[in-house]
Structure formats: structure tokens, C-alpha cells
Amino acid sequence: MAIRLGLSLPQARQYDIGRDVPDVARTAEQIGYQSLWVYERALFPEPATQGLYGVEGLPWPDVYRGVPDPLVTLTLAAAATDRARLGTSILVAPLHNPFQLAKSLATLDAASGGRVLAGLGTGWSLDEYAAAGVAPFEERGRVLDEIIDVCRAVWGPDPVTYEGRITKIASAVVGPKPARPIPILLPTNSRKAMTRLVDRADGWMPIAMGAGQLAAQWRQLQDLAAERGRTAPIETVVRVNARYTPKAYDGADRSPFQGSVAQLVEDLAAHAESGLDEFFFELQGGARDAQELKDVAAELYESVRAAGL
């Protein structure tokens, strides 16, 4: 069975959001991509008070300037497509009011006919937490747990009731309901995060950083699921932060998913041996404009399928 392929939507500054998002989404679906993805970067501190990923001295990339709201971006894509799944990778969930986030995701799923995938995470930017004002950065894990609980409650049958640290819902009708239970997917970077995923989520969202490393992480997650008695399958959606170049990259220091389309396909084949369900490609950051993004996406898709993947 062929692996599922997805594509990130254009959110960088070189794109016209209102024009290019629907155009790329529509074209990607016509090409054959089965999912469309957005990420969240709420602001760009200047000067930066904290390094990228919290690493001191590591600069923020320019592509993080002016990133549009992820759910608005997905709504534009939903209106332009019919079949492609619509995912967040990732939504920094604790930046959002839990009730409002649950209702927004449910509304988008109802409007799109059951196509939303909620990839949620805790993020790392102190500035974003300060600006959002929902909860302190130090409480991000507990807030994510509450958000998952609130989503399950709001998406479930009426009357909805919930009593949490941030959210209090007396007996109430809350609609619209999602068209089907929205899958919640989580990344993992610690044993605690893996346990949260196994116990409370539907799927895993790793980043492809090497075939061996990905396979080892997947085995570790499966072992933990067996240890904790999980019987439901864990959906897997792998993010590929590709660094495409028109010509093959021939340096000895080539990283996974760096280089030409042929090299990207070669790396995908190695990563796919782990038996993971879906891979989506982040290509939009390196493209000059929407036309180049569409052209590279089409060449990549055709090459992946020609390789039998």
C-alpha cells in the first residue's frame, strides 16, 4: 500500500495568504496530496530575548516573521478543497483558551466534512506565552492536558460539563459538533510526553531527522504502548523539513532530506521502511513563490509514486 503524502501550506512572508493558500491547497489536492498542513508561530521578538527552541544564541529564522494564524489558514484551504485532510503541525495549544480552541476545531471539522487533524504541542517561546496570557510557560504540560480534556468534552454529546483549572463549563449545549471524532496527535521529546501520547492521544507527530533514529523512536513508542496495555492503533504522521535544491547536493555533510527531488525520494524510501503511515513535506519556506512551490510539489509527488512508495 502506498504511503500517504501531505504538503505544508504557504505561510511565509513571500506569499499572498488570501490568494496563494487556496491556490496551493487546490493544486496539491489535484496532484494527489492527501493532507495539507500548517504550523503556528505567534510572533517574532525583536530583539530576541530567547534563542530559537530556547537555545541561547541560536537566532530565529527569518521565515518566522509574520506567520499567519494557523486555523484561519486551514479555513482558506478547507474552502478550496474537497478531500485532503487538514492538519496542524503543530498548534501551540497552551497559547489558546481551551474552550475556544475546542470550539474552533469542531467548527472547522464540521464545515470541512470531517477532515481536521489536531496536532498539538506545548511550544518553547517564552515571548509567545507572555503575549497570549492564558497560562505561565511553566504550566504548559498541565494546560495541554486540560485542553485535551476540554476538546473531548466539547466534541462529545450534550449537555457538556467540565470543571478544570482554566475551564469551567456548566451543563450546556455546545455546537457545532465535529463531523467525526477529531484525531489528536502529539509530538514526543520525553518519557512524560510519550506517556501522555499513549494514554491520551490518537497519533504521533515526529520529525524525520534520520531513518535509524525515527525507527528507534517508533519502536520505543510501540514498546511503551504495549507496556501500558494500549490496544488502539497509533496513527503516525511524520513531518519532513526538506531543504530542496534543484541540483543534487553532493557534499559529504548532506543531511536527511537535503538536496534534489531524487535525493528526497531516496531519503523517504529509507524512512518509510519503519512502516509509518504518512509523511508530509515542508517545502514552502524555501520556495520563491507559489508557482515554484507547486512545481516542486508536483515533481516530488510524481517521483515518489514512480519509485513505488
Image (spheres, rainbow, N blue to C red):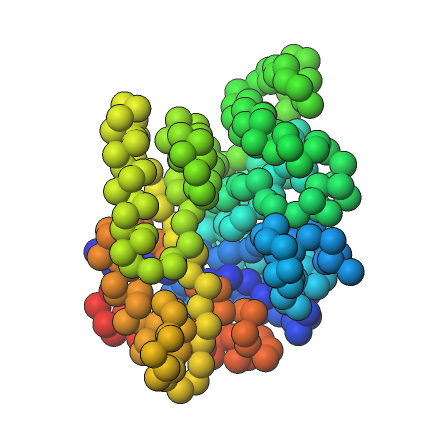
Q: How many marks?
A: 0
Q: Residue furthest top?
A: 171
- Determine the image quadrant of residue 129: top right
Left or right of 113 in this view: 161: right
The residue located at (49%, 69%) in the rendering is 283
- Determine the image quadrant of residue 261: bottom left
The residue located at (53%, 80%) in the rendering is 292
Residue 77 image position (x, y, % from top left): 57, 58
* In front of the other: 280 or 181: 280
Q: Residue furthest bottom?
A: 247
The residue located at (66%, 74%) in the rendering is 14
The answer to whether residue 147 shows anywhere in this view is no
Q: Is residue 218 above or below residue 228?
A: below
* In front of the other: 160 or 6: 6
Q: Is residue 240 above or below residue 125?
A: below
Residue 309 image position (x, y, % from top left): 25, 64
Q: Is residue 110 above or below residue 213?
A: above
* In front of the other: 20 or 137: 137
Q: Residue furthest front?
A: 56
The answer to whether residue 228 shows anywhere in this view is yes
Residue 158 image position (x, y, % from top left): 57, 18
Left or right of 81 in this view: 228: left
Quick one: quadrant of the N terminus? bottom left
The residue located at (40%, 73%) in the rendering is 258
Residue 29 image position (x, y, % from top left): 45, 63
